[in-house]
Amino acid sequence: MMRGTATDLTIRSLTDNRTMLRSLRAIRHSPMGRAGRTHRSLRILGVLLLALPILIGGMRRPAAAIEPSAIDAVARAAIRAAADPGPTPVEQADFQVSPNREETIAYLRSVAAACGHVEVSSFGYSTEGRRLPLILVRDAATRKDPPGTARPKPVILITAGIHSGEICGNDALQLLLRDIARGLEPDIVANLDLLIVPIFNIDGHVRRDPHHRLTQVGPADGFGTRRNALRLDLNRDFAKLETPECQALVRLASQFQPHIYIDLHTNDGFDHQYELTFSAGINPSYPGRRDALVRKRLIPHILERMSAEGHPAHLMAYPLDEFDLTQGLSAFGVFTRYSTGYFETRQTISILSEAHPYVSYEQRVRATLALLRAIMDFAVRQRIELVETVAEARRTVQRWAFQPGKHEIAIGCKADPDRSRMIPFLGNAFDIVTSPITGRDYARYGDERVTYEVPFHDHYIPVATATMPRGYLIERAWGPVAATLQRHAIEVQRLTAPFRARVEVTDFTDVQFEAEPYQGHHRIRELETRVAIEERTFPAGTYWIPLDQPAGLTAMHLLEAHSPNALLVWNAFDTIFERGIVAEDWAVEEMAWEMLSEPGVRAAYEDALQDSAFAADPDARLEFFFQRSPYVDEGERRYPVYRVLDADAPVRVR
């Protein structure tokens, strides 16, 4: 299509500007505005006003005043640059079919051709070598200003299609970009910078089929897969960081340092009356002002705004008992393997969106769009506080590194089972049915609407904790681990001279692995440790990871032995659990008899025999003696990562 001609608008005053915007929104919500489908370029203000009933078809957004501070010269420039890229592919298909990759990219290019504030780019490659598309929305007038001269703006990173079967986010983003191109969102252009990944799992997106999700309503012609080409779930890869897709996204985020991250999904699970649920991760051990901004300001703003726009929404909630909703609901946990939990470690306010799978596809798309607009409205109105609060939180956690042992950090969070508040929850009635196939009971939901009064567990407690050290020293043999940390944009240094430090030394006394693979790994399920504080000298070449850096908390989540998503759990250090020498049973048996003559060993052995499981396990009893023998390799079961407890960091590093 032809590039739209920029409209030359002259707006004489702030009052004129606000009046015009209210008029635009009022026309957009008139019956005529919802019915129109014709698409044409805008050249003068008169043409813009006459054409609005045609150009803004299908939108359901109530009139809302924009704060005066958002309507400035930059916003007026956004309106002047307005042009119409035409209807989105999903609109052309009456919300029955979602566009494929080629159709999506073609439409996004037409948006960029119509609007100078929108750029189509890419930020990496998928597992199968496809470009990962990236859309940047930045004010064209200030894009080339010298660093430090532009006003501080919140940066918002948005991903859709991380599970490409849940693709309503891609279509919602196209609707948003369409309105930006038409000049209907000048506040966004003026006050925010957007980084949009419309299809993250692009290899999964090209594998379209209507059978990739069991219970989802639409799109009619099918949708992509949950996993990528290697059958890895990208939303489980943000700790181990094995896929090129997630590595590219982490690089992108490290470059732009977003203040807000939004991950758009469609949910599974039980039925209810809400079109969308969402989670805004809150780690109680992170700086409190940021926590308050999310819990007391952002979450209520989203709920109020979506309700006003006719899209019922709720915080993500899961039944504690699927057969008895009155037992309560639990909020979603915060874990580093998920994208939202991962970016929380960078103090980025992270929001997980889950559209309801049982409503129509159009409802899912429009509810997701309403959520995006609610978040952006908040970011525009509170942009100065948002930028300052996130920046302060990032400075604070870096300062904590200079007070080793003082600050307790929650390494993963879950809902507190002992703390709740009563809420009304708009659910659906269900029957408990006994299956004639399996004989088990299951819940069959109906159409009857029920309002439940239930306890909601939405306060978070740690899954594990650790005090923040000054940093970590990693033995120089573990270069692959250092390389993984660098892929996380974590600064890794190396000692150029020996360094003596007071450190925590961790030995593993027991380890249990999962029997079944998860994301290609037999993860560690359970650990027991013995920790000692020692003065040690580390040779040149040892890796040094200081925590006074932007990714310092991320490093903690990856290196703490008891972190539920540590690299240790993802098998990065498995060789330390393997025996270093051949130890024949008969030789250990003979050695054990001799060791029993030592009073201390005999007493410890007799004490261990009080454990019936130990007493019944011959291998465990032999291992008891071997672990107390001089034949144990120093590296066996020794964690080659050392927590540095002194405030002084190594001075000779590179």
Image (cartoon, rainbow, N blue to C red):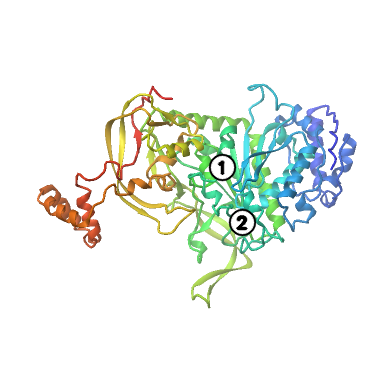
Mark 1 lies on a secondary structure that is strand
State whether residue 258 appears in this view: yes
Quadrant of the rendered image containing residue 562: top left
- Expressed as whole percent of the image width and height from the top left, the position of residue 120 reads 71, 38
Quadrant of the rendered image containing residue 465: top left
Quadrant of the rendered image containing residue 649: top left
- Expressed as whole percent of the image width and height from the top left, the position of residue 352 reads 58, 47
Q: Which mark is residue 225?
A: 2
Residue that appears at 30% across and 38% down: 505
Mark 2 lies on a secondary structure that is loop
252 vs 573, left or right, is right
Work out how far the residue at label 1 is from the one at label 2, CA to CA, in angstroms. Answer: 24 Å
* Marked residue nearer the N-terminal end (1 or 2): 2
Count of number-bearing discs: 2
- Residue 363 vs 469, above or below: the answer is below
On-image quarter of the N terminus: top right
11 vs 188, left or right, is right
Residue that appears at 71% across and 60% down: 221
The amino acid type of the residue labelled 2 equals Thr
- Residue 502 vs 135, above or below: the answer is above
The residue beneath circle 1 is 350
The amino acid type of the residue labelled 1 equals Ser
Relative depth, front residue between 29 and 561: 561
